[in-house]
Image (cartoon, helix red, strand yellow):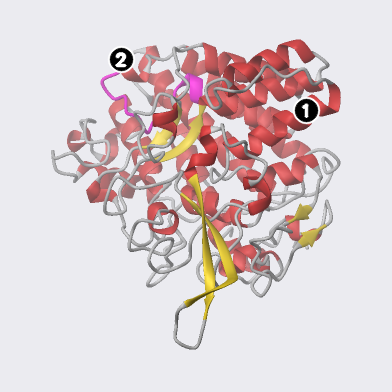
């Protein structure tokens, strides 16, 4: 029996949670879920949306692993995004606290560590519950556009989950196609299966995301839909996810086309300077394509994204001292005229004399981040997909395809909103590609993209910077393709599923 496919009743529990919400402004409460019974879950669009609502809520919930007492670095997808960034080269740790074991790659060395269990459990729980929807897709009643709205999101969420699994538990796509990766489950079951290869997993991911996009193209737009909500994935968000998948596969044509369709299919606006520095905490931001809309009743306070990120709060990333900072090396590459530099604030601390007064000798410099600042009391929405990333994917793919002029224009369209002094690039070839990749690194800091980029670009890890805490950084460099760039399949999985072998 497979450990991770264990929550057969999880969907019904999700519906129960959502259905018992009051009519106050709670999570996705505009949905008429109070009338949805267990028998209606897979026979009505209301039931299907209720299941989706539960999945989305689970994706940022505290203690997804279900441990007794929980852990304050387990709050779903936003927690994983922090993990992926501290494992990269742009977010040096300040003190030994939550995420320091991730930072030092301890969790990638042993299959009995909790983090590898949490990751595996999280994505397979999503897959298992999405499979509950898809197992019953022929039973749904209602208008085609309404059914497409439910099924399109279900296929997209399954593709999204397998995309993370294959990148966490194996090396990047190119060069690893034939390697064993993770099991594929396309229906709810308690029977374990063997791991599929990287290629097989990506084949399934592409099939799912293609179908997700196709169905959402024929669905009622969420902003015109009685069940619509900011937290739902619409066709533009699905296309952007498809672009990320194709980029990781080095399928430049598909990634370019999907990114372009994602950013141009709707009247998205790029942020003004004031919007960029407002805290990245609202789904009403004109660039957000998909994000989790969080309210006070759903906010777990200390085990939350803003507790770990916001330096102004009384949380882990604030007064408790585990500040999330930007690498000094990356900070120095951002031009002073670039608004993105304004969300980072270097503060110099001096050594003290015997009387406790500052000397002239520098002790340390902390490059505080103010990109992610809560709207108060640890509260804020959680970004998952922004239109700026679609610009950067499109520009990168055009450059890789040799279309320098188009790449320069797409990059300029983005950068002219970030830096009033930015002149359209005249770079070509590798110089243009490197310029685009630098702006990707700057633009997406803190959004959980860097570790996957390090893997797909095969550049290895290099954390050397003046603000590196050398006493804390157990690992400063790693070569491309190192075994630390993949998590071990959990021991709890290999113990109960005799068909799957350890991957390291």
At 44% from the left edge and 83% from the top edge, which residue is drawn? 356
Q: Is residue 350 visible?
A: yes
Place of residue 293 in the rendered image (x, y in percent of width and height, measured from the top left):
33, 38
- Using the rendered view, name the quadrant where residue 469 is placed: bottom right
What residue lies at 61% left-to-right and 42% top-to-bottom? 449
| Residue visible at 48% across and 24% down in the picture | 152
Q: Is residue 233 at least partly visible in the picture?
A: no
Within the magenta stretch, is there residue 226? yes
Which disc number belongs to residue 411?
Answer: none
Secondary structure of the residue carrying numbered label 2: helix
Give the quarter of the image for residue 366: bottom right
Q: Main secondary structure of the magenta part?
A: loop
Q: Quadrant of the C terminus?
A: bottom right
**From what the image shows, is residue 422 above or below residue 283?**
above
- Residue 285: x percent and y percent? 38, 28
Bounds of the magenta segment: 225-237
In the current view of this chain or complex, which residue is farthest to the left?
23
Cα–Cα span, label 2 and label 1: 39 Å
- Quadrant for the N terminus in the image: bottom right
Is residue 1 or residue 329 the one in the foreground? 329
**With 245 as the anchor, is 171 left or right in this view?**
right
What residue did someone put label 1 on?
Answer: 433
Q: Position of residue 302 (x, y in %)?
A: 35, 62
The residue to which callout 2 is attached is 224
């Amino acid at each position: 029996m497979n450990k991770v496919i264990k929550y057969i009743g999880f969907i019904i529990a999700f519906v129960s949670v959502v259905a018992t919400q009051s009519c106050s402004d709670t999570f996705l409460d505009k949905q008429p879920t109070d009338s949805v019974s267990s028998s209606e879950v897979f026979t009505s669009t209301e039931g299907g949306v209720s299941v989706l609502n539960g999945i989305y809520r689970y994706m940022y919930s505290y203690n997804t692993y279900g441990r007794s007492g929980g852990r304050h670095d387990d709050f779903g997808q936003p927690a994983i995004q922090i993990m992926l960034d501290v494992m990269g080269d742009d977010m040096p740790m300040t003190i030994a606290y939550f995420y320091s074991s991730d930072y030092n790659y301890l969790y990638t060395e042993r299959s009995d560590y909790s983090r590898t269990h949490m990751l595996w459990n999280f994505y397979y729980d999503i897959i298992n519950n999405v499979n509950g929807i898809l197992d019953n897709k022929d039973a749904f009643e209602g208008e085609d556009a309404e059914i497409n709205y439910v099924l399109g999101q279900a296929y997209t969420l399954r593709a999204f989950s397998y995309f993370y699994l294959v990148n966490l538990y194996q090396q990047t796509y190119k060069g690893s196609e034939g390697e064993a990766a993770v099991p594929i489950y396309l229906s709810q079951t308690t029977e374990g299966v063997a791991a599929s290869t990287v290629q097989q997993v990506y084949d399934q991911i592409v099939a799912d995301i293609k179908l997700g996009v196709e169905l959402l193209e024929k669905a009622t737009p969420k902003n015109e839909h009685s069940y619509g909500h900011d937290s739902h994935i619409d066709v533009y968000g699905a296309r952007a996810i498809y672009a990320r998948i194709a980029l990781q596969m080095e399928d430049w044509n598909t990634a370019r086309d999907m990114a372009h369709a994602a950013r141009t299919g709707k009247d998205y606006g790029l942020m003004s300077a004031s919007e960029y520095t407002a805290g990245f905490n609202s789904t009403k931001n004109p660039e957000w394509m998909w994000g989790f809309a969080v309210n006070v009743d759903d906010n777990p306070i200390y085990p939350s994204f803003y507790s770990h990120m916001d330096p102004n709060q009384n949380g882990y990333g604030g007064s408790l001292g585990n500040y999330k900072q930007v690498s000094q090396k990356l900070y120095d590459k951002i031009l002073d005229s670039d608004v993105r530099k304004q969300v980072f604030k270097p503060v110099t601390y001096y050594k003290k004399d015997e009387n406790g007064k500052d000397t002239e000798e520098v002790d340390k410099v902390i490059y505080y981040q103010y990109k992610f600042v809560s709207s108060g009391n640890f509260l804020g929405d959680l970004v998952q997909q922004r239109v700026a990333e679609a610009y950067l994917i499109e520009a990168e793919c055009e450059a890789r395809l040799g279309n320098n002029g188009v790449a320069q224009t797409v990059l300029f369209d983005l950068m002219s909103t970030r830096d009033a002094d930015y002149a359209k690039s005249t770079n070509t070839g590798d110089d243009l590609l490197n310029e685009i990749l630098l702006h990707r690194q700057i633009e997406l800091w803190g959004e959980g993209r860097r570790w996957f980029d390090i893997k797909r670009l095969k550049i290895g890890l290099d954390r050397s910077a003046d603000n590196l805490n050398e006493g804390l950084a157990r690992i400063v460099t790693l070569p491309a393709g190192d075994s630390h760039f993949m998590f071990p399949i959990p021991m709890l999985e290999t113990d109960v599923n005799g068909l799957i072998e350890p991957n390291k």
